Amino acid sequence: MATERTLSIVKPDGVANGHIGHMISIFEAAGLTIKAAKLVRLTKAQAEGFYAEHAGRGFFGELVEFMTSGPVVLMCLEGENAIAKNRELMGATDPAQAAEGTIRKLYAESKGRNTAHGSDSPASAERELKYFFSEAFELVG
Ligand code: CMP
């Protein structure tokens, strides 16, 4: 298994409901290391660009509105198999389908307000980390 990096987002509901600390604990307990982190309020343009692959889908407007509704925490997680591990810790996109003990099962309200984001492939992870972090100044190590 390879050491990977992936983008994790604590979405506005996770920040507003006070779950940043527990989510970081879940990642660290699973052996993932935080290589970069920042709390930011995304602009409409930033959220639209980040989710560009979903432009045109019925939920796109709602998704952008939600992701800009309050601050989010952006993190670079690193570890063995980090992309899949993060997705396992988050649980399914729809909290109704998420396994017990996962972040979305614990905290998410709906498919839209689903508390966490994680890159879904190595290519996405590379694009998403570059989208939010500068290699030279913000990524540790
Ligand atoms: P995320 O992992 O951030 O990537 C795309 C997001 O689109 C996804 O999480 C969901 O929050 C959102 N999404 C996907 N399908 C729907 C849907 N049917 N209705 C509302 N939001 C959705």
Image: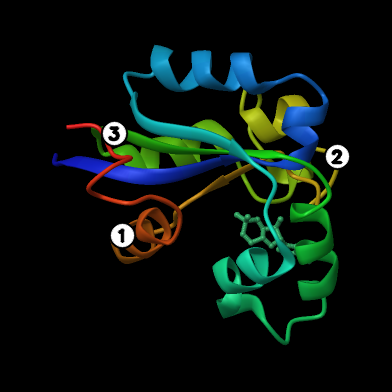
Residue farthest along the bottom direction in this orientation: 56
Picture layout, residue 41 above or below residue 86? below
Residue at label 3?
Answer: 78
Which residue does the image show at 52% across and 34% down from the upper left? 38
Q: Position of residue 57 (x, y in %)?
A: 74, 82
Crowdedness of circle 3 by 10 Å Cα count: few (<14), some, many (20+)?
A: many
Q: Is residue 33 left or right of residue 18?
A: left
Marking on residue 126: 1
Above/below status of 17 relative to 90: above
The answer to whether mark 2 and mark 1 are in CB contact below 8 A is no
Give the residue at x 61% y 65%: 46
Q: Which mark is residue 109?
A: 2
Instruction: Identify the amino acid type marked 3.
Output: Glu
> What's under tag 1, amino acid-wise?
Glu
Disc 1 to disc 3, C-alpha distance: 12 Å
- Residue 102 position in % (x across, y down): 61, 28
Q: CA distance from mark 3 to mark 2?
A: 27 Å
Picture quadrant of residue 99: top right
Image height of 112 relative to 139, above or below: below
Q: Nearer the viewer, residue 94 or 59?
A: 59
Find the residue positioned furthest to the front. Answer: 137
Residue at 74 percent of width and 44 percent of height:
114
Q: At numbered mark 1, what does the secondary structure look like: helix, strand or loop? A: helix
Q: Earlier in the sequence, mark 3 or mark 2?
A: 3
Classify 10 Å Cα crowding around label 2: few (below 14), some (14-19), many (20 and above).
some
Question: Front-most of 56 and 36?
Answer: 36
